[in-house]
Image (cartoon, rainbow, N blue to C red):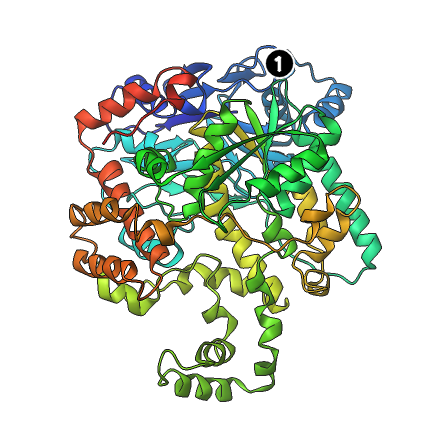
Amino acid sequence: MCGFVGIIHFNAKRELDYDQEIREMNKEIAHRGPDSEGYYSNEKIHYGFRRLSILDLECGSQPMSFGNERYWIVFNGEIYNHQEHREALKKEGVQFTTATDTEVILALYDKYKEKTASLLRGMFAFLIWDSQEEKIYGARDQFGMKPMYLSQIDGDYYFASENKSIEKIMPNKTVNPSALQHYFTFQYVPGEKCLVEGIESVSPGTYFTINQEGTMTSTRYYQATFKPVDMEEHLLAKQISDVLHDSVKVHMRADVTVGSFLSGGIDSSIIVALARQLSPNLKTFSVGFEREGFNEIEVAQETAAKLKVENFSRIIRPADFINEFDNYIWYLDDPLADPAAVAQYFLAQLAGEHCTVSLSGEGADELFGGYPIYHEPISLAAFDRFSPGANKLIRSVVTKLPQKIKGRGFLLRGSTPLEERFVGNAKIFTEEEKRLFLRTFDPNQHYMQVTDRFYKRSVGLDPTTRMQDLDMHTWLVDDLLHNADRTTMASSIELRAPFVDKEVFRVAAQIPTSMKFKNNTTKYILRKAAEEFVPEHVLYREKLGFPVPIRFWLKNELYDWARQIITNANTDAFINKQYVLEMLESHRKGEEDLSRKLWTFITFIRWYEIHVLMGNDKQKTYDSRISGTRSGIRGFNSLN
């Protein structure tokens, strides 16, 4: 596990010290690979690499070459089927000089060229330079587990595992107004555009080439598509059980200590139960809060005891949030206003004290239908009997009713087409609300520009599956997996999510909605598949998510802190500060729960001040603190 940076300049128009730039960029991701660094340069390309040692393999350093130095690669991730490919290539006469999955990627590219990415099972992002054809080939994994960003400046291409490496060499940083507007809809920045203008994310399941003329061409090689089929329950449960056993097995490959996150829910319990079969000394990690209803540590400890694994836990207090919030913002790059992401930041710190690799349960809800909102189309089925015109009439009448009248929300949602009412799991502000506070609001930048392409490709599927599909390609990628990568890399540990695997998805894609919701529970068929190895007390337990008590904290312990951030904000060009302060007061008085909306503002404000406005002196402070040892990284304190 690691991080990389790269500069491609076939037609360089600037007189720059590229070697200096690549080193400055690489320094920004020291936390991703504190064990070693490496560089490769020629007249066309420059690579930088940071390494976190996971497998004790011979000559695993990068950048790595192959084919008498014809090919050069920088690669971030893990390939879980590399051993199978290695054996097949050996039979064809390919000779390997290392035992790494990195060299297998190069050997596959030598034989299969652009088809290489589609042959890989794992999490990955990489760049390959072909010195003979003077061509770049790059790819990102099927689901977006591993990140890769790019920017084009004066004809030069810049690549990096994190935005901040590219931000480092940008002379002026400005905010992308359309990305900002979408952030205030989704609470994260969706899609390819990043919040800093000029930086983009390579899409999951995509490979690209850059030829001698500097022309970049992107191709989608994988598209996760749900294809429900009728199947007997016991057969489907058996397939799910088998593929999960296999996925956890390959995700456990490492020569370092492997642990696992453990909450009070079914998803992480499945992972821990299966991992325990392979590693009896498995360590597990849990966090909670000192407030009733926001602490699942006891449930997690009960699960750990029944599975006979060690559990380490930590209580997170309001002062912890305040002290680490700026660091969290720094490591996350683009703002992510999900309070659970901050909690996972602390969970990763705890895990980092005991292991270098940790498993988690991300992806189970999106693949197996775990969110209660997915049941909504069943509850609203009666509206399907009405014509679109009739539903439109109902909607026009209901919108004129008082906000607090009983049944208004039900009628409004039922009469609204799915494509308009479901924006994904994290919708936070409506278009009408954004007009009131967002000074850069553009009525032509509607949130449906993000969701429309996914809804178009899912036409013909049932509504619940269409909702899953949307979350799979937005919320999972840009919130959950972004969070998972950044929060764990901040503590220099590698996170692996066995549910987010193309073989697991191949089975999960077949599940009909009738087996997602049954016996008053979500993820029914997944729970059925886990009956033989998951403790009964957690098997059918109601989903709680990762609850964080900011609703209470923003009224009390975090109120002064939040008010100071908003009052001193340097974001008047973007948001109406008075609007936000009035929201804070309304929330404090208990008139309305506005905690998630306030958290979205607070996150953006600090992001803007740290990533855009931060001056050279403060930047140097960050540089010195993140370029030390892993223990130094974990001791990284607040700058305030």
User: Which residue is at a point 28% across and 63% down the rendered structure image?
Assistant: 434
Q: Position of residue 338 (x, y in %)?
A: 41, 48
User: Which residue is at a point 46% across and 29% down the rendered structure image?
Assistant: 349
In the picture provided, is 37 more to the left or to the right than 195? right
Residue topped by disc 1: 57
Whether 484 is drawn above or below 278: the answer is below
In the picture provided, is 606 more to the left or to the right than 399? left
Q: Name which quarter of the figure residue 343 lies in.
A: top left
User: Which residue is at a point 63% across and 66% down the rendered structure image?
Assistant: 461
The one nearer the camera, 638 or 365, is 638
The one nearer the camera, 12 or 465, is 465
**Quadrant that contains the C terminus:** top left
User: Which residue is at a point 52% across and 36% down the rendered structure image?
Assistant: 139
Whether 452 is drawn above or below 608: the answer is below
Q: Position of residue 286 (x, y in %)?
A: 54, 36
Whether 123 is drawn above or below 218: the answer is above
The one nearer the camera, 602 or 9, is 602
Residue 537 seen in the figure:
yes
The one nearer the camera, 415 or 469, is 415
Q: Name which quarter of the figure residue 88 lies in.
A: top right
Amino acid type at circle 1 is: Leu
Residue 493 seen in the figure:
no
Please count the marks in the image. Answer: 1
